[in-house]
Amino acid sequence: MINIGVLALQGAVREHVKALEASDVKVIPVKRVEQLEELDGLVFPGGESTTMRRLINKYDFYEPLKEFAAKNKPIFGTCAGAILMAKELVGNVEPHIAVMDIKVERNAFGRQRESFEAILPVKGIGDDIDAVFIRAPIIQEVGSRVEVLAEFDGEIVVAKEGPFLACSFHPELTEDNRMHQYFVEMVRSCVVPA
Ligand code: GLN
């Protein structure tokens, strides 16, 4: 069975665990660095990226997460999680785990639309994905190896670069598990059978 972790320092952890459990995988809320060793893939949940980064430093996750990504193990970041994955952040802010060649702007949809829901086509996943945006970031720019999977109002909201998947919205807050199923398939295709 495949093991997928959810980084459990802060944010919407339980919801991701539930969404992943709908697929036939073992889901592990990750609170200690040693747990990373048993994982085939990892989710960075939504929440608050600066808080999450502070906890990553506090519990010595920074280097181990960089190493996890350097092994090309799949990572799925949603909302704050996508912010953690970006190599570049708007506003001269230092990037965090910096694994994807994307430039991300935090809280980019403005006050009137702090949170909203939309039905979006996501390439390779579905034409009608239920997307909940909460103080969501947008992906302003992507590098040449990054594939854009979805846009909303002309802004990039889902992108993939090899084993890394970033999404501005919160697929874990709906009953629609297709984004998680897609990630599970990404993980399966990376795991070499024993
Ligand atoms: N605005 C948050 C941040 O900057 C992300 C919001 C979310 O994850 N719902 O980290």
Image (tube, rainbow, N blue to C red):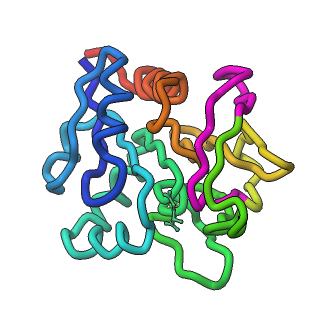
Q: With 110 as the anchor, is 11 left or right in this view?
A: left
- Quadrant in which the C terminus is drawn: top left
Q: Going 61% across and 54% down the picture, which residue do you hit?
A: 115
* Quadrant for the N terminus in the image: top left
Secondary structure, magenta segment, majority class: strand
* Residue at 23%, 25% in the rendered image: 26
**Residue lying farthest to the right in this orientation:** 154
Q: Kindly indicate the quadrant of the structure image that contains residue 27.
A: top left
Horizontal and vertical percent position of residue 176: 52, 24
Q: Is residue 75 visible in this depiction of the protein?
A: yes
Q: Is residue 188 toward the left or the right of residue 32 in the image?
A: right
Asked if residue 65 is among those painted magenta in the image, a careful observer would answer no
**How many numbered markers are drawn?**
0
Based on the picture, tell me whether residue 133 belongs to the magenta stretch.
yes
Q: Where is residue 106? Give x, y as percent.
A: 61, 68
Asked if 87 appears above or below 150 in the picture, the reply is: below
Q: Residue 167: in sight, yes or no?
A: no
Q: Is residue 41 left or right of residue 46?
A: left
- Which is nearer the eye, 120 or 64? 120
Q: Residue furthest front?
A: 112
In this view, the residue in front, 137 or 64, is 137
Tell me which residue sits at (74%, 41%) in the image.
Answer: 148
Q: Is residue 142 above or below residue 103?
A: above
Question: In terms of depth relative to the viewer, which is nearer, 139 or 160?
Answer: 139
The reply, left or right, for residue 69 in relation to residue 143 is left
Residue 135: image location, x then y, percent: 58, 61
Magenta-highlighted residues:
119-139
Which of these two is toward me, 143 or 114? 114
The part of the image, by quadrant, that contains residue 90 is: bottom right
Counting from the top left corner in percent of width and height, residue 9 is at 25, 59
Q: Residue at x 44, y 39 (%)?
A: 74
